[in-house]
Image (tube, rainbow, N blue to C red):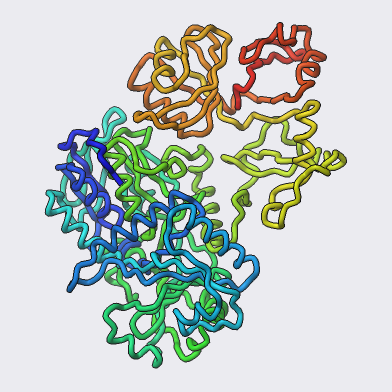
Amino acid sequence: MSGKRSLQRDPNTKIVILGAGIVGCNIADKLTELGMKDVTVLEKGPLFHTGGSSSHAPGLCFLTNGTQSFARLGLHTARKFESLNQEGEPPCYLKVGGIEVATSAARWQELKRKLNYARSYGIPGAQLLEPAQVAEKIPFVDTTNILGGYYVPEDGLTKAVRVCEVLGQRAMERGARFLGDAEIIEIIKKDGVVKGVVTTQGHFEADIVVSAGGIWGPKIAKMAGVPIPLQPLEHQLVFLKPHKELKAFKKAAFETMEPILRHQDARLYFKQLWDTYVIGSYQHRAIPIKAEDIKSNAEALKSKLPMKQPSVHAFTPEDFVDRAFVDARQLLPKLQDCEIDWGINGMFSFTQDGMSIFGESSQLKGFWSAEAVWVTHSGGAGDAVAEWIALGRPPYDLREHHIERFEKHGFSPDYIRRRGSQNFREIYDILHPSQPLLEPRPLRITPFYQHQKDLGAFFLEVSGWERPHWYESNQHLDSAHAPARDNWSARFWSPIIAAEHKVAREKVALFDMTTLKKVEVAGPNAVKLLDKLTTGKMNMRTGNISYTLMLDESGGIKSDITVARLGAELFQLGLNNNVDIAYLKEHAAKIGNVYVQDITSAYSCLGIWGPKAREVVQSLSEDDWSNEGHGFFKVKESFIESVPVRHAPFLCR
């Protein structure tokens, strides 16, 4: 992943990683491989069976994902872990392949889309299977009710604790230090910079602290004063008693010889384990847990549970037997002969948008997050964060996982809990790319919201804002030219949109642009900051607007933005998201004498577009709105009747 890039950080930088689970071990391994010489990994539990999610995770790695970054991180993970296998040693990764079955027409179409994802994202060998082909690979599957399957040879089973052992040992051979039973007591910081960590095993100085605590991530972040909106939830895993027809597998070379299996229509997954099966279920109610309430290792050791570790709670059979077990036995009827041996409710991390949380916090310099990572993506995620720290940037575009992406309301405990719980419930659902989360809503509305509702607006949510996508009051408009769409493509869409676009192209239309990001950049070094970060020439005349690109340190495109110069030391920018704002603030702090302020909620914004736009505005104003009176890409301070306005074409994008 790193190619020929060189270190951008002093190799003697003191780096402390909090957590020796599968993410922390991957980060330590990659950092030491890249040449970082002072790496310490602190773990509150024992090494390497730490008691966190890595210690009980079933390890099933289905690599195909509709999110490109996850697909890439997953494929990297599988290949890295497979490369760790050594003859005569317990395996780290069993590449047995994975099959997802469809028992509904909608799921079968979803599997076809997954095949296209795999082809687009470089996952080799993916193919669709006939029902009989599924049964050839997994004989226990009853093909009566399935329409087919989706097979990926690269899918497999990760042995998480074994991976931690191998990577931890490799990192230690390169000079890293690992210390178990070192619970974090305090994160030391001074003047907005991290300085070290205090544990039950002593004090450790640090220039960089990486939070890889998984379900304990929010607790660690609270010590740092950096909120990480992550929600631990319980998930059921059931171990069945041996089956006579699997007796031969008891002496097999590896514990899993068949492909791993998902039955997402029933929210279930399966793996063959020696002479029995293990079943995971997402059918049950969401059971959120506060990070502060998770038991200590000492408390867990006193429990009577089959797995004595903090991340495991008692199995709740009422959530499994009546529905999930019935559905499991319908797909694999021979499991009628198997009873439950034991089960657990194990904890995993969920976020409000389903993404991970990576990167350095803007609130505490030197504090990094590598949280909300599942085993499937752990190798790729750990390596990516390590490269980001050591080489200055990650190998992939990880902006959708960036720690700075969240809006303020996204840090509310109620919001984190409700959104995390909904993501748990919907984890195996067939979700349209435009499908919004349903609660809590509405949270953020513009001044025009009630009027939009009165016009029959259909709202989707972006960053907590309610944004209209069409108005039922416009259904009388001509939409005959709207192209036909199938049921999937037509979700969260209406032919009214095409009619509204036609009016905008041919006449004039009004758009609510309030929700788009607006930022002020001001100060003596405002021009210097913007010149450094963009492709445009920012020392333009006051009143001019530039549509430009904001670049990263290597010249890659971070964002396309608009910049209006309002004064000698004052600019207003139209941005895309909070990650853009954090990037500006980071470099503003380095340059000095310039400040960056988010003013999105301070101003409403309307876009008036179309051939007759100037006529509409002119009818409401005494100023000259002709081409001569107000040129393209120019700022104009004016009045619309009695309302003061700042007119800046494309400023809000």
Q: Is residue 644 left or right of residue 211?
A: right
Q: Is residue 201 above or below residue 163?
A: above
The picture places residue 231, in percent across and down from the top left corner, at 45, 54
Residue in front for this viewpoint, 130 or 196: 130
The picture places residue 595, in percent across and down from the top left corner, at 43, 19
Query: Residue at image x 43%, y 14%?
Result: 526
Query: Residue at image x 76%, y 40%?
Result: 498
Q: Is residue 445 above or below residue 294?
A: above
**Residue 298, visible in the rendered structure:** no
Q: Quadrant of the C terminus?
A: top right
Residue in front for this viewpoint, 651 or 353: 651
The picture places residue 60, in percent across and down from the top left corner, at 39, 67
Q: Is residue 328 left or right of residue 468?
A: left
Query: Residue 572: which quarter of the image?
Result: top right
Query: Residue 361: which quarter of the image?
Result: top left
Residue in front for this viewpoint, 74 or 520: 74
**Residue 592, visible in the rendered structure:** yes
Query: Residue at image x 31%, y 47%?
Result: 1
Can you name the residue that lies furthest to the right here?
Answer: 476
Residue in front for this viewpoint, 634 or 266: 634
How many marks the image carries: the answer is 0
The picture places residue 484, in percent across and down from the top left corner, at 75, 51
